[in-house]
Image (spheres, grey):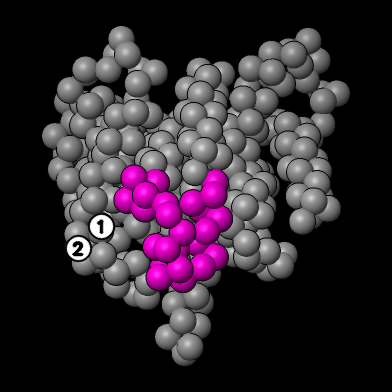
Amino acid sequence: MLRVSLLLAIVCVALLGLHMMMGSSGWGYDYLGAAASTILFDIRLPRALLALLNGIALGTAGAVLQVMFRNPLAEPGITGIAGGSALTIVVVLYSGLTLPLSGLLPVVGMLGGLLSLIALWLIAGGHTSGLRLILAGVAVASFCGALLALVLNLAPNPFAYLEWSLWLLGSVANRGWEQIYLLVPSMVLAFGLLYWQRNFINAHIFDQQTLASLGFRQNWSAWWVLASVTLLISASVVTAGVISFVGLLAPHLARLLGENRPPQLMVLSGLGGGALLLLIDAVVKLVPTTVELQLGVVAAFIGAPWLVYLLMRQARA
């Protein structure tokens, strides 16, 4: 596991370097001239770091959800958590309440994600395996999407409508160090909570009956774990919009590398998610379009067929 983790970390660093070399005007650093420092450290580096950190956050969140729900199809976007976070953030921004307190936006998004999680649990009737959870997640995500559409239709001007719509599609372009400073504290807090509850997460290698006999305060621990997951997702939504399927693809990438144990799965999923999102954003920068493609759109083109494949395989099982 250590070798694979180191290899993935090296891949992430290599992709980070390659990502910084890519620009609309050419490849490399020589042509930048006197503006090299500004372009590299104020434009390209924040974008690359934001893609890496968002991939780590979403990959880890997806792995934790799959472990906790014992469902390989669980994912931040499919379960409706990302949609709930986005809805809450847009509603608060629409009201203008957070202008002096923008650092609290991940917490605001976390509350929306937790409400979506509660709704998901109630609709699924406590069943976290099979297609019932996914169908409940689709229902929650669809309802949040409808409410988002309503809020966008009520946008005060067409420029706000366009800005919010593009943000919801997911992107790390035109972002700066402010988003990094917003994302990192949330990730540190969320990873701290996950480390605190590591024994409870690791115990999910056992079935539900055995887990109940191990002496954990299950409801208490489960809500702390899920709170940390929603914090990761909401911080990602705040800084990069809604990027679906990374939380689904990264854990399956880790499983293809031979890891199913929760600690190793979480680590490899985080590193794999970071590498995956860097690679997808590199594709976004390379595709010659008049308007740059949104990161979330390209991720969906990759992730949706994989989800269909997983659903078909599960149906045959």
Q: Residue at x 39, y 46 (%)?
A: 221
Q: Is the residue under label 1 in contact with that under label 2 (CB below 8 Å)?
A: yes
Q: Residue at x 65, y 49 (%)?
A: 267
In the image, 268: left or right of 190?
right
State the separation of the CA atoms marked 2 and 1. Answer: 5 Å
Graded by Cα atoms within 10 Å as few (under 14), some (14 to 19) or many (20 or more), the crowding at tag 1 reads: many
What residue is disc 1 on? 120
**Helix, strand or loop under label 1:** helix
What residue is disc 2 on? 123
- Quarter where residue 148 is shown: top left
**Helix, strand or loop under label 2:** helix
Residue 74 appearing in the image: no
Image position, residue 195 (x, y; %):
55, 39
Q: Is residue 304 above or below residue 272?
A: below
Magenta-highlighted residues: 198-223
Image position, residue 92 (x, y; %):
22, 26
Q: Residue placed farthest to the right in the image?
A: 30
